[in-house]
Image (spheres, grey):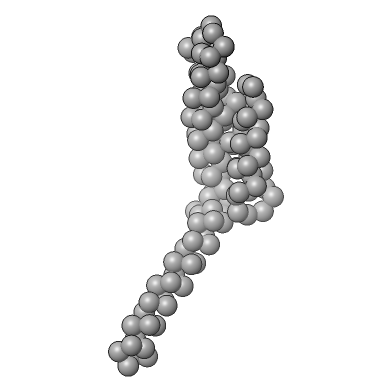
Amino acid sequence: MTVAPDLLFGGMAAIQTEGDLVDKALAGAGSAVGGIGGGLTARGLLGPKSGLGILGTEMVGGIIGDQVGYNTANALIRAKHGGMTPQEQVFAQQDEAYQQAIIDNFLAQNGLG
């Protein structure tokens, strides 16, 4: 129960990340390592004695660590791709196409295009 959920969520992060295999590996490893580290850190700092306390600190620390690790991995992915992740690049392209469609529609409706 200490490591398995973090590995599962790391795998899910890898699967859901756009980009090449390196991007997926960075996201998955960042999420998993962050979750494991966060859970163990919270458990070590708080030192719970009961099973429920251990589970709670693992969960809360794992969630926080997962976010820190995933955000760190995204920063590396952004650096690799020149400032935006592949998903952000797709969103930017879609946004640009949508804005152009609005402009084209406006021009056509007003006999300007």
Q: Residue at x 60, y 43 (%)?
A: 13
- Image spot of residue 88 (x, y percent): 50, 56
Q: Quadrant of the C terminus?
A: bottom left
Q: Residue at x 54, y 53 (%)?
A: 85
- Image height of 104 relative to 41, above or below: below
- Image height of 27 relative to 38, above or below: below
User: 67 or 72, which lies in front?
Assistant: 67
- Residue situated furthest right in the rendering: 21
User: 1 or 74, which lies in front?
Assistant: 1
Answer left or right for 25 relative to 90: right
Res 29 visible = no
Q: Residue at x 41, y 76 (%)?
A: 100
- Image spot of residue 89 (x, y percent): 52, 60
Q: Quadrant of the N terminus?
A: top right
User: 49 or 52, which lies in front?
Assistant: 52
- Image spot of residue 31 (x, y percent): 58, 36
Res 53 visible = yes
- Image spot of residue 19 (x, y percent): 63, 54
Q: Residue at x 60, y 54 (%)?
A: 18
Q: Quadrant of residue 26?
A: top right
- Image height of 32 relative to 27, above or below: above
